[in-house]
């Protein structure tokens, strides 16, 4: 879908062409500058910029420049396909000026010279109060290449409706969340609760998770001891013993406990989303933004959805241990092919968009966490019980490693999980498969640890 919003902005420089990207053109006495944003998933990511652009237009209405902010939304859900589509555009000389995608793309984008350094934007007052981990993650080889948009945390969702049927109350729900933060609600406690749900037969399934590649899959591996990056060499690493423990967890949930359906990874994203949103499963390994999914698949809104569903962190493996969450922050990127003139306009737009009046409505509607302190302290944000509570999980959140080939690693992990859940491989065999596959695909970038 392509949508155009007209903006009036300051006339800065003459018509030019740069690296195959069309410069401003004169229309009706005005200079027209087009900024195309290419992205996937939630269209709120465009709407945030759109709203900031409208306000910026009000301030600059007397000036004689008109910008067209073009919404180039990729309808698919496959991240690799989106990136391949972007690559084809860049190679053909049709690179979009703006992009939005997760932090995992930063190494690839930089090494392929797709994106521009944005040190001046991140070091500006507009981003001085951005969440520190967002700044750290936006940096690659000493420079910033990404502009914070949102951050989230991964967690376990549970159906309050189903748990009420086995006697749990609102006070139990509050306790589970608080104790998941302190390490007093452990993995054994979680599995015991799953068994109660299964025995009561209150849902078709007990525990479900993402059926495709995504940060939740590496998250559980990290929880069981996998460290994916060797900091000394900068190489990725496969810790076989820890990975086997991780895959045993998934195997047991299917075949030892009967919590997870064996065919779950055959489901589409929409199918599994509908399963958990409609209480056909009691527990779902997802993220805080999944409230957006609840609103999409049910009659709930942002408030009523939380009367029926709750969250707690991926529990500590032992009493007093630490829970874990993985954040997969999304960023805006600016093309390395953009002209100096267009970059000035883009910089103005992003600095405007950092204000809470745009960032907070976006966070609430998309169910993401505030990316800066001003937004987190905004009364409207603090009033949202789900987001203000979830914000505490950032203390325990990490991100996937910044390595150009980690997406390959993540895909191989998903293949191993699928093989285990389909009982095509034992956990040990699946780890051996991962070793062979990673050594084949990235022999110079992987370390194997027994």
Image (cartoon, rainbow, N blue to C red):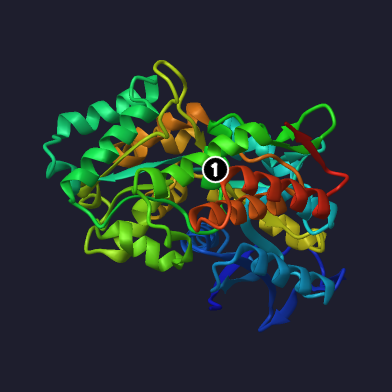
Residue in front for this viewpoint, 205 or 127? 205
Say if 43 sits above or below 395 in the image.
below
Which residue is painted at 46% across and 35% down in the image?
A: 374
The answer to whether any part of residue 348 appears in the image is no
Residue in front for this viewpoint, 249 or 147? 249
Residue topped by disc 1: 247
Which residue is painted at 65% across and 36% down in the image?
A: 135
Q: Is residue 414 left or right of residue 340?
A: left
Say if 136 sits above or below 316 in the image.
below
Position of residue 239 measured from the top left corner of the image (x, y, whole percent): 69, 34
Position of residue 285 measured from the top left corner of the image (x, y, whole percent): 41, 46
Position of residue 66 measured from the top left corner of the image (x, y, whole percent): 63, 71
Q: Is residue 88 left or right of residue 53?
A: right
Q: In this view, does 203 lie to the left or right of 318?
A: left
The crowding category of the residue bearing disc 1, from other C-alpha atoms within 10 Å (few below 14, some 14 to 19, many at least 20), is: many
Query: Regarding mark 1 in the picture, which secondary structure is present there?
Result: helix
């Amino acid at each position: 879908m392509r949508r155009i919003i007209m903006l009036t902005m300051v006339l800065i420089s003459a018509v030019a062409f740069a690296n195959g990207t069309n410069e401003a053109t004169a229309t009706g006495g005005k200079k027209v500058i087009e900024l195309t944003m290419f992205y996937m998933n939630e269209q709120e990511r465009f709407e945030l910029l759109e709203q900031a652009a409208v306000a910026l237009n009000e301030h600059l209405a007397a000036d004689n420049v008109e910008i067209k902010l073009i919404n180039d939304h990729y309808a698919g859900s496959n991240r690799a396909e989106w990136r391949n589509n972007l690559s084809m555009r860049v190679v053909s000389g049709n690179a979009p000026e703006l992009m939005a995608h997760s932090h995992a793309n930063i190494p690839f984008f930089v090494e392929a010279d797709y994106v521009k350094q944005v040190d001046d934007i991140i070091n500006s007052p507009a981003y001085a109060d951005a969440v520190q981990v967002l700044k750290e993650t936006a940096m690659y080889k000493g420079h910033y290449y990404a502009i914070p948009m949102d951050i989230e945390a991964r967690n376990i969702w549970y159906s309050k409706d189903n748990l009420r049927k086995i006697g749990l109350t609102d006070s139990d729900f509050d306790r589970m969340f608080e104790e998941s933060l302190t390490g007093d609600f452990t993995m054994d406690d979680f599995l015991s609760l799953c068994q109660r749900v299964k025995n009561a037969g209150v849902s078709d399934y007990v525990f479900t998770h993402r059926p495709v590649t995504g940060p939740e899959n590496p998250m559980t591996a990290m929880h069981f001891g996998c460290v994916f990056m060797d900091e000394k060499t900068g190489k990725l690493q496969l810790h076989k013993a820890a990975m086997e423990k991780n895959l045993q967890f998934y195997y047991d949930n299917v075949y030892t406990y009967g919590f997870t359906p064996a065919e779950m990874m055959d489901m589409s994203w929409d199918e599994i989303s509908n399963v958990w949103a409609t209480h056909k499963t009691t527990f779902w390994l997802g993220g805080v933004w999944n409230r957006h999914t609840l609103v999409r698949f049910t009659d709930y809104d942002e408030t009523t959805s939380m009367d029926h569903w709750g969250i707690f962190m991926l529990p500590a493996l032992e009493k007093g241990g630490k829970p874990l969450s993985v954040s997969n922050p999304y960023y805006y990127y600016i093309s390395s092919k953009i002209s100096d003139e267009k970059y000035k306009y883009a910089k103005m737009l992003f600095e405007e968009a950092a204000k809470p009046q745009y960032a907070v409505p976006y966070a609430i509607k998309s169910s993401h966490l505030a990316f800066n302190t001003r937004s987190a302290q905004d009364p409207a944000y603090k009033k949202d019980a789900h987001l203000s509570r979830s914000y505490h999980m950032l203390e325990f959140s990490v991100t996937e490693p910044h390595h150009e080939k980690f997406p390959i690693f993540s895909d191989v992990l998903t293949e191993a999980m699928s093989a285990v859940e389909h009982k095509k491989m034992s956990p040990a065999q699946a780890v051996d498969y991962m070793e062979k596959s990673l050594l084949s695909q990235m022999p110079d970038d992987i370390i194997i640890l027994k």
